[in-house]
Image (cartoon, rainbow, N blue to C red):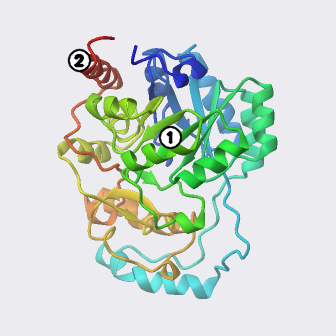
C-alpha cells in the first residue's frame, strides 16, 4: 500500500501528504484543518507570531480538526560576528533602492526600520504549552533541550535539510523525521550550513543522496505539485511528500488573491533572490527579483522587508507587480486546483492510477 509509510505511522495520518507551512502570515487554520481532515497533515508557519498569537492559532486549529497537524518555527541562526547595521549602512541601502521608490512616487523611509523578529525562546514556551501533535523547524538544528521537552509531550519533531550534511546533523540531534527540501522549493531557502549556501541540489538528487546517508524517514519537498511527481518521490524512497506552492494557490490559504492568480495563470519562471527580505528565497521572476543586488546593499533580515513595505504597499495598490516579491516553487505543469480538497483528492487519484495494486 503506497500510503502506508514510516511517516504515516509516526504521524498517525492516512496519506503521506504534508501541506508545507508558509511564512509571511500566509498560513491559515482553515487550510491546515482541511488537509488534516482529508487524511494528510496540515502545517502552520509561526515565525512572525508572538507567543500569545501562537496559543490562539493552536486553539483555532484544534477547534477545526481532531486530526494530526503541525506547527513550524525557524531556528535562530547563530553568527560569530554579527553584522553591524547602522545609519551609514542604511544610507547605502536607500541609495540602492531610491530609483524604485521614485518610480512609484513613494517617499524613502528616513530612519532605520525597527527589528520585528520574535523571540524564539518565548515562542517555544508557547509551543510547549500548546503541545501540538507535530512540531517542525527550518534554518537549523533544534536545540537539544527543545527536542527533549517536545518528546516529553509526545510531539513528533521534524526538521529541514537542503543538503545531506545538514540531514546528518539533524539525525545526530535525534529528530524524528527530516524534510529534504530541494532547490525547486518556494519561499525562503532553509540552508543552515554556511558552506552549503550556494549548493543547489535539485529535489531528486537531494532525496537520493540523503536517503543513502541517513536512516531517519525522509519527506521530499521542492517543486512537487501533482500526483505523478509525488508518486515518483515515494518510489524513490521518500516516506512522504511536502507540497507548498500548490496549496498556497488554494482559496483556503491566506495568500493575497493577486498572488494566487499569478500562481494559477501559467507556469511561472522563478529565481532565488535576497532582494525582498534580506534572506535568499525563491520568487516569481520579475525585474526587481532578477537584479543581482549585493548583500552589502541590502538590510539584514527582517529589516529589508520592513524597509520595502511602503514600496510593496503602493505597488500592490497600483498593480505594479514588478516591485513585489511573490513566493513560488519552480513547478513543471500549470496549477489547476483552487480548493484544498480538490487538490488533495486529485493527488490521491493520480497516485492510485499510477499504483493500481494499492
Q: Is residue 316 above or below residue 262?
A: below
Considering depth in this image, is 94 or 120 the residue closer to the camera?
120
Q: Looking at the figure, which quarter contains the C terminus? A: top left
The image shows residue 17 at horizontal and vertical percentages of 43, 26
Task: Estimate the spatial distance between the alpha carbons at disc 2 and disc 1, rounded to whole Å.
Answer: 26 Å
Circle on res. 353: 2
Q: Which mark is residue 357?
A: none
Residue holding disc 1: 211
Q: Residue at x 65, y 30 (%)?
A: 56
Asked if residue 124 is positioned above or below residue 197 in the image, the reply reads above
Q: Nearer the viewer, mark 2 or mark 1?
A: 1
Q: Mark 1 packing: few (<14 Cα in 10 Å), some, or many (20+)? A: some
Image coords of residue 174 (percent x, y): 71, 39
The N terminus sits in image quarter = top left
On the image, the x and y values in percent for residue 193 come to: 60, 62
Q: Quick check: can you spot residue 29? A: no
Above or below: residue 183 compared with residue 107: above
Q: Residues within 10 Å of mark 2 (few under 14, many from 20)?
A: few
Q: Is residue 160 left or right of residue 156?
A: left
What is the secondary structure assignment of the residue under circle 1?
Answer: helix
Q: Is residue 181 above or below residue 44?
A: below
* Residue 35 at x, y percent in the picture: 44, 23
Residue at horizontal 36 percent and vertical 44 percent from the top: 256
Q: Secondary structure at mark 2?
A: helix
Q: Choose top left, top right, bottom left or bottom right for residue 127.
A: top right
Q: Is residue 73 found left or right of 174 in the rendered image? A: left
Amino acid at each position: 500500500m503506497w500510503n502506508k509509510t514510516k511517516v504515516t505511522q509516526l504521524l498517525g495520518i492516512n496519506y503521506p501528504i504534508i501541506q508545507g507551512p508558509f511564512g509571511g502570515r500566509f498560513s491559515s487554520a482553515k487550510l491546515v484543518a482541511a488537509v488534516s481532515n482529508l487524511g494528510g497533515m496540515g502545517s502552520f508557519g509561526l515565525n512572525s507570531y508572538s507567543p500569545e498569537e501562537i496559543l490562539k492559532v493552536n486553539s483555532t486549529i484544534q477547534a477545526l480538526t481532531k486530526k494530526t497537524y503541525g506547527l513550524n518555527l525557524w531556528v535562530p541562526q547563530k553568527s560569530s560576528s554579527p553584522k553591524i547595521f547602522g545609519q551609514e549602512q542604511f544610507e547605502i541601502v536607500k541609495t540602492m533602492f531610491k530609483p524604485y521608490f521614485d518610480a512609484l512616487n513613494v517617499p524613502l523611509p528616513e530612519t532605520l526600520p525597527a527589528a520585528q523578529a520574535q523571540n524564539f525562546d518565548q515562542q517555544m514556551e508557547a509551543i510547549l504549552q500548546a503541545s501540538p501533535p507535530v512540531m517542525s523547524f527550518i534554518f537549523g538544528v533544534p536545540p537539544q533541550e527543545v527536542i527533549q521537552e517536545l518528546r516529553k509531550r509526545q510531539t513528533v519533531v521534524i526538521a529541514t535539510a537542503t543538503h545531506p550534511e545538514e540531514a546528518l546533523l539533524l539525525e545526530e540531534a535525534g529528530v524524528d523525521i527530516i524534510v529534504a527540501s530541494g532547490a525547486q522549493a518556494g519561499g525562503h531557502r532553509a540552508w543552515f550550513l554556511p558552506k552549503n549556501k550556494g549548493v543547489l541540489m535539485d529535489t531528486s538528487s537531494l532525496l537520493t543522496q540523503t536517503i543513502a546517508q541517513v536512516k531517519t524517514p525522509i519527506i521530499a519537498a521542492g517543486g512537487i505539485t501533482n500526483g505523478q511527481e509525488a508518486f515518483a518521490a515515494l518510489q524513490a524512497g521518500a516516506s512522504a511528500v511536502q507540497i507548498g506552492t500548490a496549496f498556497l494557490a488554494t482559496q483556503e490559504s491566506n495568500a493575497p488573491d493577486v498572488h494566487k492568480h499569478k500562481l494559477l495563470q501559467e507556469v511561472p519562471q522563478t529565481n532565488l533572490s535576497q532582494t525582498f527580505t534580506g534572506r535568499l528565497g525563491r520568487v516569481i521572476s520579475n525585474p526587481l527579483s532578477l537584479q543581482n543586488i549585493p548583500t552589502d546593499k541590502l538590510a539584514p533580515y527582517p529589516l529589508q522587508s520592513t524597509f520595502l513595505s511602503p514600496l510593496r504597499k503602493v505597488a500592490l495598490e497600483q498593480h505594479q507587480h514588478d516591485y513585489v516579491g511573490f513566493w513560488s516553487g519552480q513547478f513543471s505543469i500549470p496549477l489547476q486546483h483552487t480548493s484544498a480538497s480538490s487538490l488533495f483528492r486529485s493527488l490521491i487519484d493520480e497516485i492510485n492510477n499510477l499504483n493500481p495494486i494499492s
